[in-house]
Image (cartoon, helix red, strand yellow):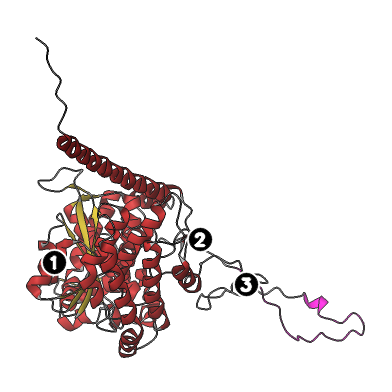
Amino acid sequence: MTHLQTMPDPNDLHAINLQLRAVIEKQNKTIEYLQEQLHLLKHQRFAKDRRVDVPVAQGDLFFNEAEMLAVDGEENLDAQASETLNTETVAVERHTRRGGRRPLPANLPRVEIIHDLPEAEKICPHDGTALHRIGEEIAEQLDIVPAKIQVIRHVRPQYACRCCAQGVTIAPAPPQPIPKSNASPGALAYIATAKYVDGLPLYRLETILARYGVDLPRATSAAWMIRLAVLCLPLMNLLRERIQESDYLHMDETPVQVLKEPDKPPTSTSYVWAIRNGDPAHPLVLFDYDPSRGGHVPKRLLGAFRGALQTDGYDGYNAVVRENTLTHLGCWAHALRKFQDVVKAQKVPKKTGKATHALGLIQRLYRIEREHADATPQQRHHARQQHSIPILNELLTWLNTSLTHVAPKTTLGNALHYLHNEWPKLQRCFDDGRYALDNNSIENTLRPFVIGRKNWLFCDTVHGAQASATLYSLVETAKANGLEPYRYLKYIITALPSATTLEDIEALLPWTTTPESLADSY
């Protein structure tokens, strides 16, 4: 019997062909996206660090949250963006001053060493008369004296009556920051400054002090910092109240590892949250530790806060925004970085394109901000309504058109959808002249913590993490108010043991303390 081979149905072939084409197209898009990510990672790993004068003052040091406005070269920009960036972005370089060195600070103490002529040489060799002083030549040198370590002895004389021998009279002991400890306010302030300002791990500080003959184990220093944080709790509680009474806040978070976290393995990730108010007259910074990154943490930290909250695109802030009816502001620097990454991801950078067009428009917004940096909030708001809003409208029209022409699962698609999803929050930044365009102020506030984390790597206990958050809050708030951290810490550590009323605590707030009042803290 002969078997006849039947021909496949043309309709089936056409359907199979369409399916294969769809699979190939999807694979090609995936390959293209992965190639873009590879180029972007290579650029981040090997490209030169080009510092520019942009709204963000830090690079990838901050947990991939920092933005740089400059792209990899002017040749990567289209005509409009190139013209904009060429005129609005100025490279920052360290210029060597020619013709003389920088003068030494005038506030440093001066020690004069007189190099005078011998009396015999103060006679004129020509006529024998005495030489007359007509001036002097002064040359200054910077002198550094190593740390001065001393022991403070508290001597309390004892008195008794020789006749009745009814007892001994002695002056009361002065209140100490850590009772029954040999830590002075100066020593505590020095250790806290070394770790939380200079990012010096305690084991290095132990080695440094050993060179001076002081045996201070790191376990002792760590215990002192925890007890110091407890001493500062009344001041911290007052700072928390002032934060919740503000009407404009910045907020962000960064990971931290705590080895002895209950019910969590040592390799798990916890978080330090940072809040900064938007009041330039009384800047306030608050750090807090929590093992979670969940939305309940902002609700706990903000309490009854009402006002404007500026964050990045993390969804964990949405719950507190809804419950407290907050004005949620976005971060233009994050949006801009998405388009910058598109340019970096291109194997052969294009002179024209959607990413460079977006860069140019956003940079124009920042230019208006720089031109009105010294203006009042009312003047800045007027300038935004007059100059920024038309650019916003142009950018929104371009965004709506571009969304329909770009595949979502691409680097450019990610940038467009981020801008689209964040648009309501980004647009609100222009509603008030007090609002910033980005969240860079809080990210800059997190910089010392991130740098310190690179040195000390982790916290051993929860108490240590909480103490670090407290002391970072104090030193960063002091710095924001123009105070030298060591002097401020020594000042409040000396005063807090005797502070018994709310007025005593309020007197220790950074904006009620002047640099002149801390002059004797060394």
- Mark 1 vs 2: CB contact within 8 A: no
Residue shown at the point (38%, 79%) measured from the top left: 369
Mark 1 residue crowding within 10 angstroms, few (<14) / some (14–19) / many (20+): some
Mark 3 residue crowding within 10 angstroms, few (<14) / some (14–19) / many (20+): few
Position in image of residue 443 (x %, y %)? 31, 65
Residue topped by disc 1: 318
Position in image of residue 441 (x %, y %)? 32, 70
Position in image of residue 150 (x %, y %)? 39, 62
First reached walking from the N terminus: tag 1 or tag 2: 2
The quarter in which the N terminus is drawn is top left
Name the mark on residue 140: 3
Residue shown at the point (32%, 89%) measured from the top left: 382
Q: Amino acid at mark 3?
A: Glu
Q: Amino acid at mark 2?
A: Glu
Judge whether residue 228 can be spotted in this image: no
Q: Nearer the viewer, residue 470 or 42?
A: 42
Label 1, label 2: how many angstroms apart (C-alpha)? 40 Å
Residue topped by disc 2: 75
